Amino acid sequence: MTDSLSSRLSQVQSRLRAACAAAGRADDAVALLAVSKTFPAADIRDLFALGQRAFGENYVQELQQKCEALADLAVEWHFIGPLQSNKTRVVAERAHWVHSVDRPKIAERLSAQRPDALPPLNICVQVNVSGEDSKSGCAPEEAMALARAAAAMPRLRLRGLMCIPEPTEDAAKLAAQFAVLRRLRDQLNAEGLALDTLSMGMSADLELAVSEGATLVRVGSAIFGDRHYSH
Ligand SMILES: *Cc1c(COP(=O)(O)O)cnc(C)c1O
């Protein structure tokens, strides 16, 4: 096993513990999702041996290949990338979680295609908290209706909300975007939905996300190193 994977994983785990302590939250209040997109299945195998169980993928074909290559391991697979409606079946059959549900059609297809032999698929509604046109995610005004609809779908289990904020050096602006997601979660819970997940924070901003209430951070490059895209 490469020392660098193991030492980078421990560094991220200590950053996470320190962020929880600084925010007055319990040590285990925030789950770590290792975002393995573009990295080989062998890296996942190494991290699994170190105790990491949850891995995130962005591309359907890559998810499928890695599930097949690692079928002997009890990996918890999270799909976190943009999802086209003609590719939902593989995700419904392979993933334990989908963080990127951003329109009713995707939720409907995932629910219809989730195999009966598996437990309901855990999902998060992805919200565009920055208002940038190019970003995926539903508008904050649409999130409540989409969350209510998804919560009622038989083969889905609505767990919470996810966002990818607009990158900015301005910590206050970033914190404000995370806070949009937290307030939406609070509103939905006030209506009686029991959302336990705020999926926000990545390699560069996990501390800020934890201080704004993240319960799951999605960390790629800080664990795996720099990505080289071949897509
Ligand atoms: C790639 C990716 C991440 C991880 O980003 P890093 O900056 O490498 O930590 C997190 N979330 C999503 C949705 C991603 O696509």
Image: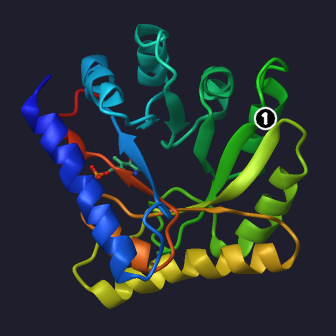
Can you say whether 198 is above or below 141 in the image? above
Q: Please state which amino acid type lies under the numbered disc 1.
A: Pro
Measured as percent of width and height from the top left, residue 174 is found at 37, 80
Q: Identify the residue shown where x is 26% and y is 21%.
A: 40
Furthest residue toward left: 3
Q: In which quarter of the image is the C terminus?
A: top left
Between residues 86 and 109, which one lies in front from this camera angle? 109
Based on the displayed image, in which of its 4 quarters is residue 143 positioned?
bottom right
Between residues 60 and 193, which one lies in front from this camera angle? 193
Furthest residue toward front: 27
Residue under numbered circle 1: 120
Furthest residue toward bottom: 172
Measured as percent of width and height from the top left, residue 29 is found at 50, 64
Q: In which quarter of the image is the N terminus?
A: top left
Based on the displayed image, in which of its 4 quarters is residue 138 positioned?
bottom right
Q: Identify the residue shown where x is 84% and y is 29%.
A: 112
Measured as percent of width and height from the top left, residue 216 is found at 49, 58
Q: Is residue 209 left or right of residue 180?
A: left
Can you say whether 50 is above or below 69 in the image? below
